[in-house]
Amino acid sequence: MDEKNLENLKIQLQQLHNDAHEFVQSIPPSQLYSAIGVVIFTILVFLIIRLFKPRASNTIVLTGLSGSGKTVLFYQLRDGSSHQGTVTSMEPNEETFVLHSETTKKGKVKPVHIVDVPGHSRLRPKLDEFLPQAAGIVFVVDAVELLPNVRAASEYLYDILTKASVVKRKIPLLLLCNKVDKVTAHTKDFIRKQLEKEIDKLRASRTALSSADIANEYSLGHGRDYVKAVKSAEMSARRAKFNRTDNILMYHLIFSFFSYRIFVAIVLSPIHTVFHFLISTLPISPTESSMAGISAEAAKAIDRRMFAVSRHLIPESNHTHCLGMSACSSGFDDTYHRVHGAVPTHIPPWKPAIDDSGKDFADIIYEKAVGEGIAKITINRPDRRNAFRPETVKELIRAFNDARDDIR
């Protein structure tokens, strides 16, 4: 770079510096300090989250009774080979690798740490070594030899579901029914029901024991709430018919039951609440009011409040547009349906269209609109099964429109 270009570059940099300095000087000190404070606070929060955030685990534990097909599944996930013949494990098979189905995909693919824990009763204590780091558990069941082993499988599954490390960390569990390609294999629904029955029996018997005998266990409690945390799937490990087993494993690895609940509670719920609020209070134009069943002239005549449509997003409901309508209200009380000034209240749509005295709501609305100047009436909670029918709502709106026309 020659001296002339270098000098021009210095001049440009100096100009940028001067412009930046002038811009900062033009900002009021209070706004500048507030912006700096927000930036510093954001950086501190980010650093604290990164510091205390636990490292995401990539360990998937395969377990189940002996002969259920855990080791064959391990080999299929690793290299797509079933290793023909009987495969018996006396020690855990533990390895970190990219799932065989992911090897052909482009881009960066994260490896998974898969642990195959032997199913022999004497070797099951080894499971406790891997549960603290587990992101998910795959409990493999033999779909052919279920009934002779249903008691043993249920006991083992119960022990896993009540372990402190599983309960505290809310580790997701996948019930994987193997050998479904056999003619005599049971369906996953049948297997799930049989295991549920046996687990209910175990729960009843074990909760009757003294607390000293189960000091290190958690109870499954009443009912079958524990079933909601257990997913089920089918496969034939030896024939490599996995019914998207690889994808299921990755799903449980990335979205554990606990993290998913936190995501819904922190992110989705507030977004849904804010979205619903904005939509339900969205003012509409006179043209849209006319489409909702209210004349444009009536909408313009109301200066105390603008008409609004409360869209409750009810799927597959022919009541959505009619019952979700906020047409006009200052409201009625529960007994006499009298107007309470400018305080907005709602007409409960699950009530009959006739009040306690036998007077029709449409007549009440007409009288109140003419005599006391109702600003708007709100048809609330349209998703109730016993809500006003669309015809009734239209009749109420028609009565209000008639009243507004008579006032004019």
Image (cartoon, helix red, strand yellow):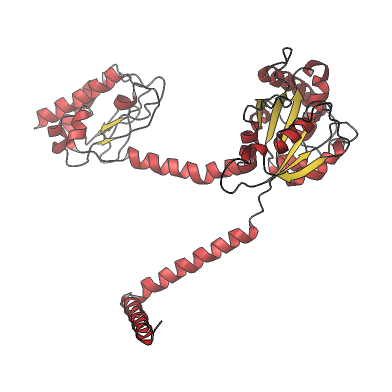
Whether residue 126 can be seen here: yes
Q: Residue at x 86, y 31 (%)?
A: 88
Q: Position of residue 294 (x, y in %)?
A: 19, 29
- Quadrant of the rendered image containing residue 173: top right
Percent position of residue 133, x then y: 74, 47
Query: Residue shown at 14%/38% (left/top)?
Result: 300
Where is 357 relative to 379, above or below?
A: above
Count of number-bearing discs: 0
Given residues 371 and 313, the one toward you in this image is: 313
Residue located farthest toward the left when viewing the structure as drawn: 408
Q: Position of residue 252 (x, y in %)?
A: 64, 38
253 or 223, nearer to the observer = 253
Closest to the observer, 401 or 316: 316
Along the viewing direction, whichever of 309 and 342 lies nearer the viewer: 309
- Where residue 268 appears, as percent x and y from the top left, is 49, 42
Question: Furthest residue to the top?
Answer: 184
The quarter of the picture where the C terminus appears is top left
Res. 38 image quadrant: bottom left
Question: Quarter-wise, where is residue 228 in the image?
Answer: top right
Would residue 317 appear left or right of 128 to someone viewing this image? left
Residue 13, above or below 157: below
**In this rendering, does residue 330 appear at all?**
no
Q: Looking at the image, which residue sits at the far right? A: 122
Quarter of the picture containing the N terminus is bottom left
Residue 83 horizontal side relative to residue 310, left or right? right
Q: Is residue 88 above or below residue 216?
A: above
Q: Residue at x 64, y 35 (%)?
A: 246
